Image (cartoon, helix red, strand yellow):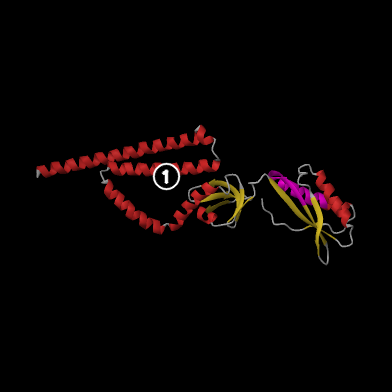
Amino acid sequence: MEAMLNKLIDICTEAGSKILLAIIIYIVGKIIIGRILKFIEKSKLTEKMDPTLRTFLSNAARIVLYIVLVISIISVLGVPMASVITVLASAGVAVGMAMQGALGNLAGGIMLMIFRPFSVGDYIDAAGESGTVKAIAMFYTELLTIDNKYVTIPNGTLMNSNVTNYSREPLRRVDIDFNCGHGQDISKIQEIMLEEMQKCGKILTDPAPFARISGATDTAMTFTLRAWVKNEDYWDVYFDLCENVVTALGAAGITGPTVSVQTRSE
């Protein structure tokens, strides 16, 4: 009886020491992981990286480090690694089948980092949503819309969708249609449009601004105005031209100058 009691005490002592060691490893490991992640974020090497790649690498490092920590704790607890590997393999198959969508999003995140259709800070239109890219995580991409709504899109969906990146190219073309009444002097209208574009200091001269009649209906003639600008000046020029051209046409006696409705995007 005494021998059994001593053996039970030895078992409890050994198990308790393993559990205590596992707790210590968890606490110390968590502190070390936190410091490693801070070092990665603040190191000079990562500061030179693109924000998109920096965020992705930080998330990947976090996952890998915690996997290593869990495996270390399991090893300290005395669980045979062969059994752990067998269980993990079986669980991996089951979890993989149950999480096909999540794994697809992970693969999508990796593909986004390789092909780079957009970066953090770009304004995009994709999967029915539009906004500025705030972060590209392992499984989803975060957007902030122009009316300050937070949107997340699964990376797998993004990889299978058409993506329009409004920020990638340094130049954009402003296209505006104006409607004027019939019987007006076409050359005069085009001249006024070109004059207003020349007055706008943000419009580029190469390629040259364009203003021509482009169509007509039973009630009006349609004139198309096109001007190339720097990407960041797009909406300033768009609204300035809408206001200034309509005002100038009205002041010149042109009847019915209006701007055709344009769906707004960044």
Q: How many marks?
A: 1
Front in this rendered view, residue 22 or 44: 44
- Residue 3 location, quadrant: top left
Decide: is 38 above or below 88. above
Against 65, residue 226 (above or below) is below
259 in magenta: no
Identity of the residue drawn at 82% across and 44% down: 199
Q: Secondary structure at mark 1?
A: helix
Circle 1 Cα neighbour tier, 10 Å, few/some/many (<14 / 14–19 / ≥20): few
Residue 170: give x, y in percent of width and height: 67, 44
Q: Residue furthest front?
A: 207
Q: Residue at x 50, y 52 (%)?
A: 108
Q: Name the residue nearer the viewer: 254 or 227.
A: 227
For badge 1, the amino acid type reads Ile
Q: Position of residue 192 (x, y in %)?
A: 86, 50
- Quadrant where the N terminus sits is top left
Residue found farthest to the bottom: 218
Q: From the top left corner, tell me how far across and down residue 117 is, in percent.
A: 57, 49
User: In the picture shown, does residue 20 fall above or below 190?
Assistant: above
Q: Main secondary structure of the magenta part?
A: helix
Is residue 231 magenta-colored? yes
> In the image, what residue occupies the spot 43% across and 37% down?
34
Reading the image, the residue beneath label 1 is: 63
Q: Is residue 70 left or right of residue 240?
A: left
Residue at the extreme left of the image, as rendered: 1
Q: Quadrant of residue 229?
A: top right
What is the span of residues highlighted in magenta in the rendered image? 226-245
Q: Position of residue 83 (x, y in %)?
A: 27, 50
Image point (89%, 57%), residue name: 185
